[in-house]
Amino acid sequence: MNELATESRTNAAEYTVSEISGALKRTVEDAFGNVRVRGEISGYRGQHSSGHAYFSLKDDRSRIEAVVWKGTMSRLKFRPEEGMEVIATGRLTTYPGSSKYQIVIDNLEPAGAGALMALLEERKRRLAAEGLFDDRRKQLLPFMPLVIGVVTSPTGAVIRDIIHRIKDRFPLHVLVWPVRVQGETSGAEVAAAVNGFNELSELGAIRRPDLLIVARGGGSLEDLWGFNDEGLVRAVAASHIPVISAVGHETDWTLIDLAADRRAPTPTGAAELAVPVKAELEAVLANLGARLRGAVSRMIDRRSQAVRAAARALPTPDQLLALPRRRFDEATSRLGRALTVTTERKRARLSAVRLSPATLARRISETRRHLDRDMLRADAALRAMVREKRIRFDRTKGRLSPEPLVRRQEAFGQQLTALERRAVLAVGRRLERARTSLSQADRLMATLSHKAVLARGFALVRDADGTVLKRAAEVAAGAALSIEFADGTTNAIAISGSAIAASGEAKPKPVARPAAKVKEPGNQGSLF
């Protein structure tokens, strides 16, 4: 009876769990091999350690699991974000391990500009709440930067426009950090470039820029989305180097425009904000110099007039010296009589003194006694002074320590080392400027030299005195001429407007005009 009870009493086919799961998988994949699903991203926590991304798509009533494989993630134009409404293209499949179905996403795009704008506004409010767009955080742009760093694509027209504009206004050194300005990795690359420029040293082989320009041409909201990257906004806000944002056209705006220290409507406008016009500065300096010279001249004139007015109020030298001169004359007249009276008095006193050996011996004895007494006092005073000095020295010796002297010596040594480094750098920069000036002068001399004109086929004609002949009318028949070519000088004799070489073999050569002056090229500057 038990055996009969265990036997199957139906003819339905029996399947294993794996067979049922496989059949469902094939059915779902065949029926939904390529679908587009619109929904809101939920549960996104970034890429897994394997590089894949797992999250869900949901609407107001349902939810479906989603997966983006590692290879697909690198090709996505937009990085998924929590709460973002998207349109996912892919295929449905099942996961037998948990009896769930999911969509394997091959492409992901925002569900219209409205969703992007909503995401952009939400990110803008969140970053503004952190104070990243506060005007108090922004830095002033340097008036005359020495080095400008540009973060942009090296192949587009933007970098050429910026360099051309800087060269026209004020030529200086430009460093370009090449990045992609569109695509999934553009935001991270631009942020890395901004951080890389900030990590450069002012004394390194590549000098740290004084100003940064982040530039890109115009485009749609999707094209400029990389410049709304949160990491890029934080890098620009934290930059120690002032940043000019020149992304898109006048009507375009991104979050980096709010975080940058200045926003330019176009990349060309950014170059105009970065550097002043050299010609205008020279004109201002010339005007100020003229005003300064005029002010100094007027001040000297006023001071000269004041001195002349004061001189008229002063007495003449004769008036000043009249009274002293009179006193001097009176003293001169009394001097002879006073000398006579003084001589008589000294003679009377000398004759009244009676000198004798006893008097001299007594005076010597008295002087020796005073000298001995003074020597005893001096010896006692010296001993007392030495004793007092020794006591003070012993008292001071206990308070002396070599440590302050050592510290001062170390401090002076550090200062000396710093001054040596600064001196080396200063000498290097001075030599570099002198080398550049010498090179420019050499090029200018070669440009202005008449040798270049002679090399193009012209000749320089001089008469016997070495005077340059400018017209054929100045050449007389039979005159001795010296004709200078690019490779040497030939002597000739003029015959009725033609010349025969002194050797008699060469063909007559026409009288050449003097070398024309070469117009000095404008100072176009150069990029270092």
Image (cartoon, helix red, strand yellow):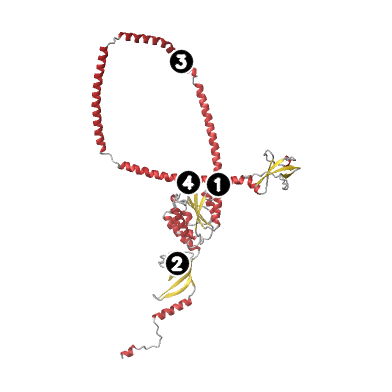
User: Few, some or many C-alpha atoms within 10 Å of disc 1 (few <14, some 14-19, many ≥20)?
Assistant: few
- Upstream in sequence: badge 3 or badge 1: 3
The residue labelled by disc 3 is 325
Q: Amino acid at mark 3?
A: Arg
Do labels 3 and 1 touch, CB within 8 Å?
Answer: no
- Upstream in sequence: badge 2 or badge 4: 2
Q: Position of residue 111 (x, y in %)?
A: 49, 66
Do labels 3 and 2 touch, CB within 8 Å?
Answer: no
- Helix or strand or loop: what does disc 3 sit on? helix
- Upstream in sequence: badge 1 or badge 4: 4
Q: Find the distance from the CA under tag 3 to the CA under tag 2.
A: 114 Å
Residue 332 numbered tag = none
Relative horizontal placement of residue 466, taking residue 109 as reference (left or right): right
Q: Amino acid at mark 1?
A: Ser
Q: Residue at x 39, y 9 (%)?
A: 340
- Helix or strand or loop: what does disc 4 sit on? helix
Q: Find the distance from the CA under tag 3 to the CA under tag 4.
A: 67 Å
Do labels 2 and 4 touch, CB within 8 Å?
Answer: no
Residue 49 or residue 480, whichever sits in front? 480
> What is the quadrant of the N terminus in the image?
bottom left
- Upstream in sequence: badge 3 or badge 2: 2
The residue labelled by disc 2 is 40
In the picture, residue 161 is in which quadrant?
A: bottom right
Residue 439 numbered tag = 1
Relative horizontal placement of residue 457, taking residue 68 as reference (left or right): right
Residue 428 numbered tag = 4
Which marked residue is nearer to the observer: mark 3 or mark 1?
1
